[in-house]
């Protein structure tokens, strides 16, 4: 009888403790997950104000406060813009937003979308690049977990001393280039390309280190580049590409429901939002030049054909380069052109 009574007490105690443990919140669910997002842009820039900070707030809201994303603009955590991808890969930070072209040669297949005179709005290019990643770029970004790819509208030429209106005007002119492909394009046209991240362009123009820049209208405004340029040539020369990517191990360690929240808030749906954001901001950027009375030139069709013919060597060089790496450059170019046309026609 004493043994039975003892067993009953033990069973009661086990049930009590089990009930107590079940009533406590799951520690993994209760703990807040803090992620650090690092990028190179100013906190006043459109990407920070309308994308990165609102996206971080959205993740916090959808996770009911379980995830807190701390956004650090303007390289506040150290390093140079070219270091950002490596910071995500190595776990120095959890997430980065950067320009693949800031690390020349690291993303040769991604460069496809920077080739000269490819048509398409920011929306079409952002959607096409996202689909292109699924088809061709998984290996290129396998050491991180990409969250979204997107693109600005095509770049134009903005110069301080003279208007670029014909091919011969490029001779010896120092023009800032955002990436290797854009530098090759400018060199083919006769200019002297100078590579630098966009935060350095204002000072470089004001001091005469460069005489112009190849950049979309939307990026002119937050960096006040209308103050240091006087002439503008609309030519749709190239484009600026972006990736937001996450440390692979950090993503893999997230609880499944948190992964689902992040997945649902990135990918193609976010690429579409960002493409529209860049397209919508082109007009205000252009309007500043018009308000200042600065000449805005559109190339004649004949002159555009001359530029296209001169830059054909850039496309051929890229095809040869990726071919040496074991890729069919012609097939990649054909697929990217198809995707740009597909997503461009979807907008009509």
Image (tube, grey):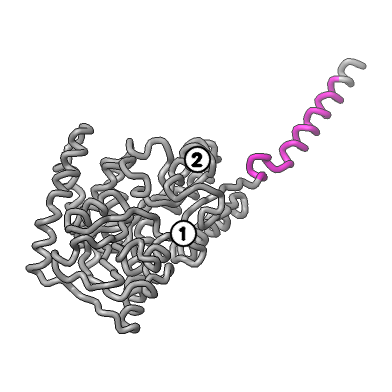
Residue 12 is one of the magenta-drawn residues: yes
In the image, what residue occupies the spot 22% across and 60% down?
Answer: 172
Looking at the image, residue 158 lies above or below residue 100: below
Residue 251 is one of the magenta-drawn residues: no
In the image, what residue occupies the spot 54% across and 48% down?
Answer: 78
Spot occupied by residue 142 in the image (x, y as percentages of width and height): 38, 36
Quadrant of the image for the C terminus? bottom left
- Classify residue 9 as left or right of residue 32: right
State whether residue 274 appears in this view. Answer: yes
In front here: 328 or 58?
Answer: 328
- Classify residue 88 as left or right of residue 31: left
First reached walking from the N terminus: tag 1 or tag 2 = 1
In the image, what residue occupies the spot 60% across and 47% down?
Answer: 34
Q: Which mark is residue 251?
A: 2
In front here: 313 or 6?
Answer: 313
In the image, what residue occupies the spot 40% across and 55% down?
Answer: 197
Count how many numbered circles sit on residues in the image. 2
Looking at the image, residue 136 lies above or below residue 6: below
Q: Residues within 10 Å of mark 2 (few under 14, many from 20)?
A: some
Asked whether the residues under the numbered discs 1 and 2 touch, taking CB atoms below 8 Å apart as contact, a structural biologist would say: no
- Which secondary structure class fits the magenta region best? helix
Q: In which quarter of the image is residue 278?
A: bottom left
In front here: 71 or 187?
Answer: 187
């Amino acid at each position: 009888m004493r043994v039975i009574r003892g067993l009953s007490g033990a069973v009661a105690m086990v049930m009590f403790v089990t009930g107590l443990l079940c009533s406590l919140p799951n520690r993994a669910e209760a703990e807040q997950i803090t992620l650090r997002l690092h990028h190179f842009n100013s906190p006043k820039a459109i990407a920070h104000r309308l994308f990165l900070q609102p996206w971080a707030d959205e993740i916090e809201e959808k996770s009911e406060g379980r995830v807190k994303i701390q956004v650090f603009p303007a390289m506040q955590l150290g390093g140079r813009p070219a270091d950002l991808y490596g910071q995500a890969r190595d776990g120095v930070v959890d997430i980065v937003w950067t320009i693949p072209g800031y690390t020349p040669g690291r993303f040769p297949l991604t460069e496809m979308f920077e080739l000269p005179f490819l048509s398409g709005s920011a929306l079409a290019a952002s959607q096409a690049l996202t689909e292109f990643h699924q088809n061709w770029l998984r290996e290129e970004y396998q050491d991180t977990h990409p969250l979204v790819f997107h693109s600005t509208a095509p770049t134009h030429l903005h110069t301080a001393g003279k208007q670029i209106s014909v091919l011969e005007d490029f001779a010896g002119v120092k023009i800032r280039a955002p990436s290797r492909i854009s530098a090759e394009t400018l060199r083919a046209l006769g200019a002297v390309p100078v590579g630098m991240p966009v935060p350095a362009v204002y000072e470089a123009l004001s001091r005469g280190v460069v005489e112009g820049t190849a950049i979309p209208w939307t990026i002119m405004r937050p960096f006040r580049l209308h103050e240091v340029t006087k002439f503008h040539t609309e030519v749709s020369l190239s484009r600026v590409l972006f990736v937001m990517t996450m440390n692979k191990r950090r993503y893999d360690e997230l609880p499944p429901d948190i992964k689902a929240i992040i997945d649902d808030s990135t990918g193609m749906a976010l690429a579409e939002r960002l493409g529209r954001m860049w397209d919508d901001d082109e007009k205000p950027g252009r309007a500043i030049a018009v308000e200042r009375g600065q000449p805005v030139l559109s190339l004649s069709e004949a002159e555009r054909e001359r530029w296209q013919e001169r830059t054909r060597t850039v496309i051929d060089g890229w095809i040869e380069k990726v071919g040496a790496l074991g890729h069919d450059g012609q097939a990649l170019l054909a697929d990217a052109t198809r995707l740009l046309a597909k997503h461009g026609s979807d907008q009509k």
